[in-house]
Image: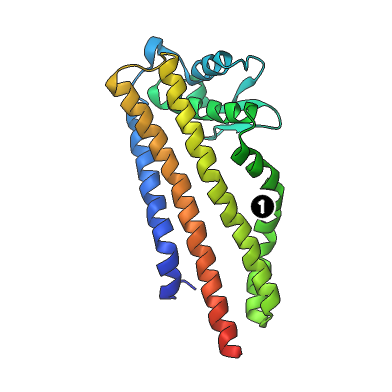
Amino acid sequence: MLDDPIFWLFTAPGLLLGFYAQSLIKANYVRYSQVPTLGNITGAQVARQLLDSQGLQKLRIESTQGMLSDHYDPRAKCLRLSQEVFYTPSIASAGIAAHEAGHALQDADDYVPMEVRSYIVPIIQLSAKIAPWLFFGGYLLGLSQIAWTGVILFGANTLFTLITLPVELDASKRAKELLVSQHLVEGNEQISGINKVLTAAAWTYVAGAVSAIGSLLYFVVILFSRFRRRG
């Protein structure tokens, strides 16, 4: 597979975008971790103020282990921030915390793309485990129906990445608007920093979607090629 030029034709765009996104995240996170927030408030304090301003006083905020492991858990109604974001009074931490708060607001507003994503997570987790076995097993054994079933399951994973895009972009949009409206960031440098941190994060989801589409197209092409020759 790795020596197949068609493989690289379909997967290279996603890989290149992924490298670009990671370099953006690293550069902007390092840079804006050095820029303090107004009043030196931490990421946890930023999230708390944003949530309280929208009537979500009961929603918990916790620190969690791991670098950039920040996430919102809709089942537990809990916003979990990595320790660095939780305790650090920086623009980078404020941007990340506000983004996760944006997901909590989506949940409270019953934002449809987020609801859809939450419902299909169990399906995606199952398909991710069995799709490779079905595809490669069917391909190697010449069983087209089994191989195509694997492709369909890969397609479900691709659909998940596409649904994730509007969810993440909307969370960042909410974050920017709330940070400004609550006067937690002011001035060109701070607003620019928030934009750059959140834009860099958005590129990772774009890269994930492009990569998933490329992989799916590659699997479709090689199946068509194999079974058309047999026919």
Q: Is residue 137 left or right of residue 12?
A: right
Question: In the current view of this chain or complex, which residue is farthest to the top?
Answer: 39
Secondary element at image label 1: helix
x, y percent for residue 148: 65, 72
Q: Quadrant of the C terminus?
A: bottom right
- The residue depicted at 49 percent of the width and 19 percent of the height is 87
Picture layout, residue 224 above or below residue 36: below
Q: Is residue 67 visible?
A: no
Residue at 40% from the left image edge and 27% from the top image edge: 92
* Residue sticking out furthest to the left: 188
Q: Residue 19, can we see it?
A: yes
Describe residue 185's horizontal placement relative to residue 48 as left or right: left
Could you say which quadrant of the image residue 69 lies in?
Answer: top right
How far across and down, in percent of the image, does residue 198 sit?
41, 34
Residue 129 or residue 174, whichever sits in front: 174
| Residue at left offset 43%, top offset 16% | 181
**The quadrant where residue 151 appears:** bottom right
Residue 39's x, y, as percent? 40, 9
Q: Residues within 10 Å of mark 1 (few under 14, many from 20)?
A: many
Task: Decide if residue 198 is on the left or right side of residue 113.
Answer: left
At horizontal 51% and vertical 41% (from top left) the residue drawn is 166
Residue type of the residue flagged with mark 1: Ile
Q: Nearer the viewer, residue 224 or 111?
A: 111
Colour treatment of the image: rainbow
Q: How many marks?
A: 1
In this image, 29 relative to 175: left or right?
Answer: left
Task: Note whether 59 is above or below 159 in the view shown.
Answer: above
Residue topped by disc 1? 124
Q: Position of residue 51 (x, y in %)?
A: 57, 18
